Image (tube, rainbow, N blue to C red):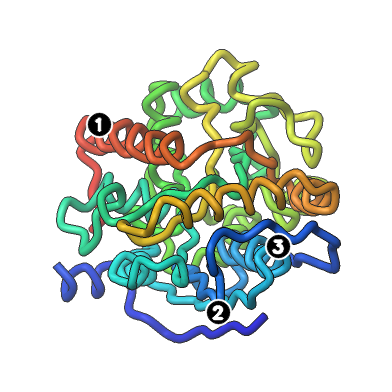
Amino acid sequence: MISSSQQHPNRRQFLGTASAVAGAIALPTYAQEAKYPSKTITLVVPFPAGGSVDVAGRAIGERLSKVLGQAVIIDNKGGAGGAIGSTFAAKAKPDGYTLVVTSQSSHVANPAFTPNLPYDAIKDFAPITLIERLPNVLLINPALPVKNMAEFVAYAKANPGKLNYASSGNGSMLQLNMELLKSQYGIFLTHIPYRVAGTTLTDLMSGQVHAMFTNIQASNVSFVKQDKLRALAVASPMRSALLPDVPTFGELKQPELNMTSWTGLAAPAGTPEPIVQQLYEAVRTILQDPSTIAAWKQRGAIVPEAVRPAEYKKEIADRIAFYKKLVKTNNLSAE
């Protein structure tokens, strides 16, 4: 599989000017309708190589090429919280040969924060299905004198203005999730936005920041096991196999905080329905393969339930509406 990546402007610059390794698996060849696909498919990943969205995109792209019988090229078009790559995909020819990896950053946080996006997360895409669901976790610096969520909330209330939290930037999904947590528990933490997400864990471990709400990944789990970070709660339908001793927000009676993140697949709006359906069935074939299930489990991802195109579109719309309300109520800004 071929990949390409390049440097791009950040979210503010772009919006201002623009108004997981697959491994060797044996999957059955999916029955093709008509002649699709008869050539290489480009899968746009609207984030740089190496991140969680890229890992999911490469994993599904490798498997799609096997199932569909055509090469799938990964095209990393990072920048502006996923807006650059998503805009490119939205304007591509709707023939099934340009697809895009969708995430909550590009298709929930961006439209929740920014009314003048150069793409419409609903109207400009033909959602196909979910690739994975990603549990989130609340991490804190272990030097804080708290051992669980109840103690953290009590400490935050007893020390107003003392605690802060890190995110991958203003207008990010990590900011939205933490602001939701603050709202649900009635606590205050100062937001510290980062331009380079990779430094957040380092600063969290050093105590420069106190907390972070993020995806469960092998890297942060290893730091928890080394007692360099402390995990207080996970957002997942069940406890994470990577953090089996950490309760879910559901167990803590906070169902609104118990939403997983997700990564999905979409085509440009106007892509013929038979092609969308063929891609949906191909992804479902992939996700039911034992090697896929094992690979997703290894990196802490959840193999999603069957989510048909119309259901996926509704989930995107529902989450945009939910977080738009949070942004408005809390007077949040992406700037």
Give the CA distance from mark 2 to mark 1: 43 Å
User: Label 3, on which residue?
Assistant: 67
Q: Residue at x 42, y 49 (%)?
A: 127
Q: Amino acid at mark 2?
A: Lys
Label 1 Cα neighbours within 10 Å, binned few <14 / some 14-19 / many ≥20: few
Find numbered disc 1 in the image and state the secondary structure of the residue it sits on.
helix
The residue wearing badge 2 is 39
**Front tag of 2 and 1:** 2
Relative to residue 325, is residue 4 depicted above or below?
A: below
Q: Is any part of residue 161 visible from this angle? A: no
**Residue depth check, mark 1 versus mark 3: number of the one nearer the observer:** 3
The label shown at residue 123 is none
Q: Position of residue 174 (x, y in %)?
A: 46, 48
- Who comes first in sequence, dot 2 or dot 3? 2
Q: Is residue 159 above or below residue 64?
A: above
What secondary structure is found at the residue carrying circle 3?
helix
Residue found 38% across the figure and 42% down from its top:
176
Q: Earlier in the sequence, mark 2 or mark 1?
A: 2
Residue corresponding to mark 1 = 325
Nearer to us in this view, 283 or 52: 283
Query: Amino acid type of disc 3?
Result: Val
Q: Position of residue 43 (x, y in %)?
A: 52, 70
